[in-house]
Image (cartoon, rainbow, N blue to C red):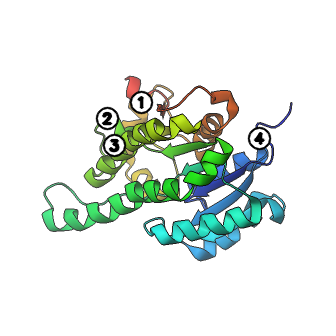
């Protein structure tokens, strides 16, 4: 079977671990050259070796997606090295910790979470615009089931992922006439370093798993497959879609 991609240049944010790393690895396996970005410079430098792929197929970048100028600089450097971006995966994200009645903490929390989870998506999407127009490529955003239902997640995180879902639809509208597709996945509970606090709360974790039809939490590879599908030509007539990848949680 031929690969899904023919040397397509892909950029994955938040890619040094967890869901982002799984997505980057799957895209490499599917025939892409992949730029991995993350805020943590040390783990980003180490990530290419951990993919098991040749160094000329993987480029690491330390990147704060909140900074539009940094996003522009990374995309410009990548384009000079490899050519225009054909696949953008906006995965970088943080989770809040404050409750709705903790007014001062929540105010700071929501500013930070929205800056990373929403503004970061917009910054990288804008930075990749010209390249995506040239390649008639695809954007896949990583939202969450909290964009569809109110779970036990913290309020800032849920609000930010709801914004990502709606932003996905507006980007699909604006990019569509240029042949660029924009979709999102909405994962349920995924066991990653970012969700370690949920795994440590046995009662909360059991409650979520019990409501999930498949009776288990996801691992990052469960999310990576649907992302690669949405980024590929197999989904060439799919845009503006928020795909739940949640083991049936939101169908319950």
Q: CA distance from mark 1 to mark 4?
A: 31 Å
Q: CA distance from mark 4 to mark 2?
A: 34 Å
Of mark 2 and mark 1, the one earlier in the sequence is 2
Front in this rendered view, residue 89 or 250: 89
Residue at the spot of label 2: 149
Of mark 4 and mark 2, the one earlier in the sequence is 4
**Residue under the image location 56 percent in, 44 percent down:** 139
**Of all residues shown, which one is farthest toward the bottom?**
42
Label annotation for residue 162 = 3
Q: Position of residue 48 (x, y in %)?
A: 73, 64
Of mark 2 and mark 3, the one earlier in the sequence is 2
Q: Nearer the viewer, mark 2 or mark 3?
A: 3
In this picture, is 118 found above or below 168?
A: below
Q: Is residue 191 visible?
A: yes
Neighbours of disc 1 within 10 Å: few (<14), some (14-19), many (20+): many
Q: Nearer the viewer, mark 2 or mark 1?
A: 2
Discs 2, 1 touching: Cβ within 8 Å = yes
């Amino acid at each position: 079977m031929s690969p899904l991609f023919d040397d397509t240049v892909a950029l994955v944010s938040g890619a040094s671990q967890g869901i982002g790393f799984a997505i980057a690895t799957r895209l490499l396996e599917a025939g892409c050259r992949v730029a991995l970005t993350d805020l943590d410079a040390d783990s980003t430098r180490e990530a290419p070796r951990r993919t098991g792929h040749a160094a000329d197929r993987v480029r690491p970048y330390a990147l704060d997606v909140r900074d539009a100028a940094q996003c522009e600089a990374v995309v410009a450097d990548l384009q000079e090295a490899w050519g225009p971006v054909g696949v953008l995966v906006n995965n970088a994200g943080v989770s809040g910790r404050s409750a709705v009645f903790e007014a001062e903490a929540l105010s700071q929390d929501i500013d930070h979470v929205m800056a990373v989870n929403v503004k970061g998506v917009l910054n990288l999407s804008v930075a990749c615009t010209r390249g995506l127009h040239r390649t008639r490529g695809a954007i896949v955003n990583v939202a969450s089931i909290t964009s569809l239902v109110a779970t036990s997640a913290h309020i800032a995180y849920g609000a930010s992922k709801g914004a990502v879902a709606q932003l996905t639809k507006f980007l699909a509208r604006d990019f569509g006439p240029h042949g660029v597709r924009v979709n999102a996945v909405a994962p349920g509970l995924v066991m990653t370093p970012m969700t370690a606090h949920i795994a440590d709360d046995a009662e909360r974790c059991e409650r979520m798993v019990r409501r999930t039809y498949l009776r288990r939490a996801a691992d990052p590879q469960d999310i990576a497959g649907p992302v690669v599908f949405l980024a590929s030509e197999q989904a060439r007539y799919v845009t503006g879609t928020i795909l739940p990848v949640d083991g049936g949680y939101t169908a319950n």
